[in-house]
Image (cartoon, helix red, strand yellow):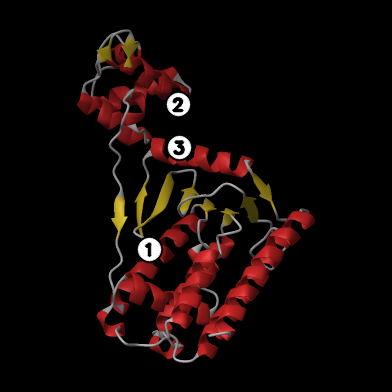
Amino acid sequence: MQSRGSISYQNKFVDYLKSSVGNSSLLANELAELLSVSKDSAYRRLRNETPLTIDEAMIICDRFNIDLSAFFEMKYQTIPFKFNKLYSGNKDLFTYFDGIHSIMTYGVSKQAKVTFAAEDIPVFHHFEYPRLAGFKIFYWQKAILNDDSLIGQQYHLDLIHPDLINTAKSVIDLYKSLNSQEIWTEDSVHSTLSQIQYFAESGQFRDVSYALDVLEDVRHMAEDLLKQAERSSKLLSTEENFVLYNSEVRIGNNSILIQSEEESRVFISHNTFNSISTTNKSFCRETELWMQNLIRKSTPINGVSEKHRYQFFKKLFLKIDETRKKILEI
């Protein structure tokens, strides 16, 4: 590994390696075997007397799960992301929901912690209520993904494949078992309410009563969220696994950080409904710091925070009632 001026990248790298392993003797033994060199050669690398080749550095990073780019003082970093693109059609929606299901299953198996910075209602919360879940699927397909099969169609639940609703429901069941914290603003519910109102005003419900049914599911969701916040748990038990924050700082996008002992992964909304994700250590760490800063500037509204919780949900229910009034006037 190269040096620039007085900066030794290898020195930083080796210091980090030593602090991670803790025992220099064991580390030298493992490096000797890993790099197929003598123990003396391994010690020379640990003392920075022999430069590590790029191949050796990559082998070490792979073995100890290290992000090599974090040791280079660059103004910009190139970070790999996976692009999770959703196309129209039931088949692709099944694939999409199966992907979320797999991520949640992994999170449960690794006892992961989830932090959700919610510009909009976290997608998981829609899935427990069939009329709301069906409407969101219809909205995504028609308004965002421009599904040709829905041209001229008006929403009713029979349009949505029942297995899609069941698959979505299985996702929320997994999410409920995860230790999670969510950062909401008073406007997090705005997007869903606006979608319902817009579809009602543009005649895209078969009957206006369907819009009111969906809105009633939003109220049920909010009522259940209030109960979860009150007991600090998404489960009907004494196990505390949920913290809800009210942020007065606008969040800007939907971001999810999933952290386990093995790795962290960040998901960021992209083009409304699609998402990009990465396990890059430095990016995940920056996201964690951003979320921690949001939390410091937020008010916890779960558990004993009765006054703040009451004020937050009072405003949320008022927004729902105002939307209902506007729909009834159509």
What's the residue at 50%, 70% (across, down)?
Answer: 194
Disc 1 to disc 3, how far (Cα)? Answer: 23 Å
Q: Quadrant of the N terminus?
A: top left
Nearer-N-terminus badge (2/3): 2
Q: Return the mark for residue 21.
A: 2
**Callout 2: SS:** helix
| In the foreground, 43 or 7 | 7
Task: Judge the density around disc 3: few (<14), some (14-19), many (≥20) Cα neighbours within 10 Å.
Answer: few
Dot 3 falls on a residue whose secondary structure is: helix
Observer-side mark, 1 or 3, equals 1
Q: Amino acid at mark 3?
A: Glu
Give the x, y percent position of residue 302. 71, 56
Observer-side mark, 2 or 1, equals: 1
Q: Are marks 2 and 3 in contact (CB under 8 Å)?
A: no
What x and y, as percent, mark residue 181? 59, 52
Residue 204 x/y as whole percent: 41, 84
Q: Is residue 18 visible?
A: yes
Q: Percent from the top left, x then y, of residue 183?
A: 58, 52
Residue 142 placement, left or right of 292: left
Label 3 belongs to which residue?
286
Confirm whether residue 111 shows in the render. Answer: no
Q: Earlier in the sequence, mark 2 or mark 1?
A: 2
- Which residue matches tag 1? 273
Q: Nearer the viewer, mark 2 or mark 3?
A: 3
Against 264, residue 318 (above or below) is below
Q: Categorize mark 1 by other alpha carbons within 10 Å: few (<14), some (14-19), many (20+).
A: some
Quadrant housing residue 242: bottom right
